[in-house]
Amino acid sequence: MTSGKGAYMKRIRYSHLVFICIFTLTTLAPAESPRRVIIDTDPGVDDAMAILLALNSPELKVEALSVVPGNVEAPLGLENALKIVSLANRCDVIVAGGAQHPLNQKLITAKFWHGPNGLAGVELPAPKCKADPRFGPDLIIELVHKYPHEITLIPVGPLTNIALAVSKDPSIVPLVKDIVIMGGSISGGNVNGAAEANTYNDPEAAAIVLNAGWMVTMIGSDVGERTLITRPYLRELQAQHGPESDFVAALADFYLTRSEKSGYQGAAMYDPLAVGTAIDPTLVTLKAMHIDVETRGEFTRGETVANRMGSNENNVLHGDHYEIEGVIELKPNARVALASDAPRFLQMFIDRLKGK
Ligand SMILES: [Ca+2]
């Protein structure tokens, strides 16, 4: 009897224990497992900030960085990407080079804004992480097939690598969970009156990506320029030290000084906001619309032209003139950011990096 009662009590205790374990796991486990992301990048001051934000965000699992020429030439971009993951002690993240030049034009680097080495002149130690031998666009194709419907692409440079990947294997389009690009603008450019730098650097690639058949989430330069890191945020970052934190503070200081000299109140958080949107889409206000990329305009090459009406007039030739015969509906191909919750995003950025 005693042993029987003992066994009964043990069963009760065991069942309680199982219940407590299940209860604890359910209440402590995150609502979702981390989202797999590939960041296609041209590092770049704001690229470096975006990468380090992603690496310090539990919502994301950074599977790979693919490097594209843009702010700096491709070899320097690859070296910078390796230095950034090395600084974060994250050699588990695959880093691969990709295209060496835009599809159809000469590269325009942006060392004026990003410093001679692309990283604000900050000399990081030589990278301990090694480059993966795969070609960036092929790596993207491989990972999308390995994790169907799980990968979010975050291209924050010219869209050359993504265009090469979807051109080589269009079957990846429906297998990608989401694509959040930093690029374009629906209200004026940052290179000139019309074009944003990433689309200006490879308009043909941008056109391929926008027309690939997926719904692109577009974080344009116009919204980035209303999401500014300012001196008070920098001071908060500088108050706690750590290798990543000190590096980001040095980048932000350089970037702020450069922006202030050009008459801005703060520095535009272009690429970090794209990562922020992948972390929490409620940080931006999105509107579905159709976007075309201008590839020929004399003053507008590289402009992302937004159709907010969802239609074009149908003009039909009648003798010596055209007549409007109704409208042709246009399917949206992009969810375009119209605004951001800048204070909430910037506080998240600072909180996740300070002291790291
Ligand atoms: Ca970039």
Image (cartoon, rainbow, N blue to C red):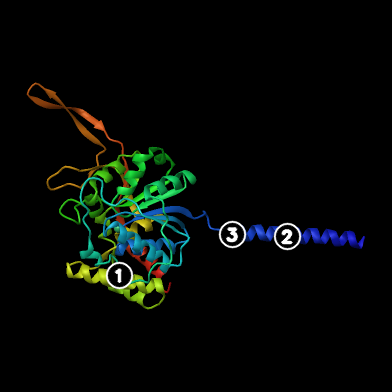
> Is residue 170 visible in the rendered structure shown here?
yes
> Is residue 280 visible in the rendered structure shown here?
no
| Residue ID at (38%, 50%) | 135
Q: Residue furthest top?
A: 319
Dot placed on the residue nearer the N-terminal end, 3 or 2: 2
Tag 3, which secondary structure? helix
Q: How busy is the neighbourhood of tag 1: few (under 14 within 10 Å), some, or many (20 plus)?
A: many
Q: Is mark 1 within 8 Å of ligand 1?
A: no
Q: Residue furthest front?
A: 133
Q: Is mark 3 within 8 Å of ligand 1?
A: no
Q: Nearer the viewer, residue 298 or 352?
A: 298
- Spatial distance from mark 3 to mark 1, Cα to Cα? 38 Å
At label 3, the amino acid type is Thr
Q: Residue furthest right?
A: 1
| Residue 277 rendering spot, x and y as whole percentages | 37, 55
| Residue 97 rendering spot, x and y as whole percentages | 36, 54
Tag 2, which secondary structure? helix
Q: How busy is the neighbourhood of tag 2: few (under 14 within 10 Å), some, or many (20 plus)?
A: few
| Residue 313 rendering spot, x and y as whole percentages | 19, 32
Q: Which residue is mark 1?
A: 252
| Residue ID at (90%, 61%) | 3
**Image quadrant in which you'd find residue 280:** bottom left
- Spatial distance from mark 1 to mark 2, Cα to Cα? 52 Å
Point out which mark residue 16 bears.
2
Dot placed on the residue nearer the N-terminal end, 3 or 1: 3
Q: How busy is the neighbourhood of tag 3: few (under 14 within 10 Å), some, or many (20 plus)?
A: few
Q: Which residue is mark 3?
A: 27
